[in-house]
Image: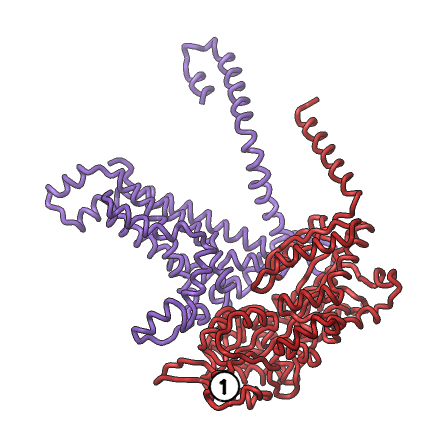
Chain colours: A red, B purple
Amino acid sequence: MHPLTKVASATAFALALGLGSAQAATEIEMFFPVPVEGKLAKEMQSLMERFNAAHPDIKAKAVYTGSYDETNLKTHAAIKAGRPPAAVIMSANFVLEYQIADEIQPLDPLIAADGKTSDAFMDQFWPALHGNARFAGKVWGVPFHNSTPLLYFNTDHFKEVGLDPKNPPKTWAEWSDAAKKLTKREGDKTTRWGLMLPSNYDYLGWVMTALDMSNGGQYYNSEYGGEVYYDQPSMRGALTFVDNLIHRDKVMPEGETDGKAVSTAFFAGQTSMVVLSTGSLSFIRENMKSGYGVAFVPSNIRNAVAIGGASLIMPKGLSDEQRKASWELIKWLTSPAVSGGWSRFTGYFAPNKAAYDLPEMKEFLAKNPDAQVAVDQLAYARSWFATYSTVAVRKALEDEVQAVLSGKKKPLEALKAAQAKAEEIMAPYVAATAMNLPK
Amino acid sequence: MAIATASDDVFVEEERPTARVLGRRHDRLALALIAPSLLFLVVFTYWPIAQVVLQALTIETFGSKTVEHGFGNFARLFADASFGRAVTNNLIYAAGTIVPSIGLALALAVGLRESTRFNALLRTVVFFPVLLPLVAAASLFLFVFLPGIGLLDHHLGRLGFHQTNWLGDPDVALWSLIGLTVWKNAAYYMLFFIAGLQAIPDDLYEAARLEGASATQRFARVTLPLLGPTLAFVLVVALVNVVTQVDHVVVLTKGGPSDSTNLVLYYIYQQAHENYDTGKAAAATVASLTALVALSVLSLRTLERAVHYEA
């Protein structure tokens, strides 16, 4: 035998052995990201051990795949390479793109096989989460952990300037008044800012969504991935509000501010109010030295914010056994007890409503009333921005908003440019869908 | 080589066939010896290069299964304002990092030239940033650059300066990254210059001193010309670094605010992984690498022509 042939046959033999041994228990892999600070990766491994102990016929392995964006990248790569993971914890606003690219499977057949209707299945989860999980007539994702933006404020600073920490600002008018009172200056130097908003890519889009929705806006067409409403009055009002806080009232620093810089400044007492994710709740609870409180994001027209967080999805191209095993894992991870435990550990809220009926959750909320605010705000939450090419379309807005934050552009011209750029990016999708007309 | 010498030699005409066979056998042996590395080179270098070029010429449209070939990706690339911005940024970044870091490296090398114990200590201190991976350095600088509370603003504030948003001001952000890069790379280039300086014989300096040359004259007339080959090498290394290292962009700014720190490599990443536009990403890769190769060849040629190799 030629040496190369020998090697090849040996490899084939080894591969056959490897595949053979997989027959015993169905082996599945799940990709998972760690989006926030903390020991989440370790906690996920212990969840997997519990799942495998309870399901001897399945051997599930959690593969840590970095941030949300990296997980998205690795999932696409794995699917392209023909070795899709059995399940992925995917940023909820990327699910639409997988559906558009026809890379994930609808979950309705699996739900039906359990003898449930899709309506009954989705009814387990908070209504605000439905939009990013069930669209185009089918269920594509199962909410795993979710968040909303929250207003965090320093109660010591509030007392110092005569504001009532029990009664945080509810409207934009009260909000900007509070920010003016809280800002401290020495000569022309600002030593304490009234308010800080995270404005790095990704976070900025989410914050602008919250402000736009609080101003009555829709931000995007939640029914069709080829439309955004960047140059509308609701968005113009929201961006002008921010522009005024920076350049007219000087209660917010100029330029872009990273989310990490925002939380650091909040801990250091350099800013009195910040808007950050509910996912940062545990992090702030552990690191904040002075007193703090949380509240809804203030409103101008109505209370409204967009959700964030992640859903479990199932790629196409799995065997029947893998699909069944993956479905077991997905159901287990989103069950009330597991969902509630993960929520208490991370600070995200539990998507499964029943999690909040469990005694350990009631006890936890009684001890941590700030977590209750996050849950209460859910009644006003809406779907997260998702379109064709979500990241690029979001960046189209973010680049222009950053120009306003730096004083390079005025809101109106910035938003017109953002809208034009977004439409240019979505043009191929629009041409193949809404503008694909009978010839 | 073996064949050439054998055929040149008229006196061993009868031996030519044997020499040829020998040569052929040599060739085969040589080929067999380099085969393993050649295989890896083909599989991991040349094949991917061919694929990138092919990808750059492949045009896919959303919603249609048919694929066309042509220069459409390049046309879209050059029409993209963000690409223009990335190229401009990269040019500013190149000029802003290469000139100061090479100047600084040269100054440090000349200053720390003598191998005294004190200099060895200083060299280690200066060399320290090189030991840090760029990702780690960038993560550290996140806190150095924090407005108001960061190390930089804290000390500048004591001197009475205003708060600066080092990474969040589109006019400043690129210069912050340039500062970080110079801090990180200067000592690395210094190492090459120190090695180059050791190769310059002392008697040249002695002669220059006898002729009454001042320190500046000795530097300009002896040190600099003889460092030519080192300088040419360092310049190419620096040029490659400018294009291939974007870890700090990923960690600190993601190209923002408003694309003001976007460099070509990060732009390629965005096109490929954020916009799923592999055609444009491949076109940008081909365009930037062509420019890089051309620049490297040009700088090596011009510098080597002006270089004195012999002392």
Residue B309 point in image, percent of width and height: 29, 37
The answer to which image quadrant residue B271 occupies is: bottom right
Residue A298 shown left or right of residue A193 in the figure: right
Q: Name the residue at 32% across, 42% down.
A: B229
Question: What kind of element bears circle 1?
Answer: helix
- Of B301 and A72, nearer the camera is A72
x then y, percent, for residue B245: 47, 53
Q: Quadrant of residue A364?
A: bottom right
Mark 1, residues whose alpha carbon is within 10 Å: few (<14), some, or many (≥20)? many
Residue situated in front as seen by the camera: B44 or B52 = B44
Residue A228 percent across, percent down from the top left: 66, 75
Q: Is residue B42 above or below residue A200?
A: above
* B95 horizontally vs A180: left or right: left
- A315 or A267, which lies in front? A267
Q: Tell me the kind of residue under disc 1.
A: Phe
Quadrant of the snapshot with the N terminus of chain A: top right
Residue at 72% across / 64% down in the picture? A338
Chain of residue at mark 1: A
B5 versus B87 height, above or below: above
- Most distant residue in the top direction: B14
For residue A186, what is the image quadrant?
Answer: bottom left
Residue A248 visible in the snapshot: no
Question: Is residue B196 visible to the viewer in this orientation of the structure?
Answer: yes
A263 or B198, nearer to the observer: A263
Q: Which residue is mark 1?
A: A158
Give the position of the C terminus of chain A as an image quadrant. bottom right
